Amino acid sequence: MAKSATGNSKALTRSSSGSNDSDGSSNAGGTAGEAFIKLLQSPLVADLLAVAATAALAALAEHGFSSRGAGDDSVRGKRAGKAVKEAGKAAAAAIGRRLSTELEEIRSASKAKAGAEA
C-alpha cells in the first residue's frame, strides 16, 4: 500500500494486464507479486523477523566479542565467522520453534471449531 502525504493509505492501481478475468480467475501479471507483498506485510512475518533478530543478537552476545588485545587477525576472523554462523543457526531455530507454535495453535483452533459444529 502506498501512503499519501496526508497519511491516508490508497490502493495501488494496476494496468489491465493484472486484472481479473470475468470468470473470477486472475492473470499471472501482478497478483502473485501482490500476494507476496501482502505476506511480507503480515504480522506473522514481522513477528518471525523479530524472533530471529533477537535470537541472533543473543547468540552474538553469548559469544562475547571483545576489542581488547591485539591478537592475530586470522584467529579473530575465524572467531567472528563462527559467531555469525552460530547466530544464523540460532535465528533459524527460533523461527522454526515459532512457526511450529503457530501451526499447533491453528490446528487446535481448527479441532475446537470442528468439535463445536458437530
Image (spheres, rainbow, N blue to C red):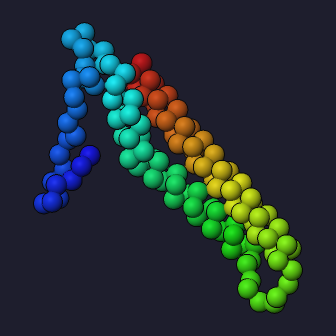
Q: Residue at x 44, y 23 (%)?
A: 114
Q: Is residue 117 above or below residue 35?
A: above
Residue 42, horizontal then vertical, whole percent? 39, 45
Q: Residue at x 62, y 68 (%)?
A: 57
Q: In which quadrant of the rendered view does residue 35 lie? A: top left
Between residues 41 and 78, which one lies in front from this camera angle? 78
In the image: residue 92, left or right of residue 27: right
Residue 40, horizontal then vertical, whole percent? 42, 45
Between residues 67 and 55, which one lies in front from this camera angle? 67
Residue 53, horizontal then vertical, whole percent? 57, 61
In the picture as drawn, the residue positioned furthest to the bottom comes out as: 69
Q: Is residue 99 above or below residue 23?
A: below
Q: In which quadrant of the rendered view does residue 36 lie? A: top left
Q: Residue at x 86, y 80 (%)?
A: 72
In the picture as drawn, the residue positioned furthest to the top comes out as: 23
Q: Residue at x 52, y 51 (%)?
A: 48
Quadrant including the C terminus = top left
Q: Is residue 4 above or below residue 57?
A: above
In the image: residue 77, left or right of residue 92: right
Between residues 111 and 86, which one lies in front from this camera angle? 86
Residue 111, horizontal then vertical, whole percent? 49, 28
Q: Is residue 88 visible?
A: yes
Between residues 74 and 23, which one lies in front from this camera angle? 74
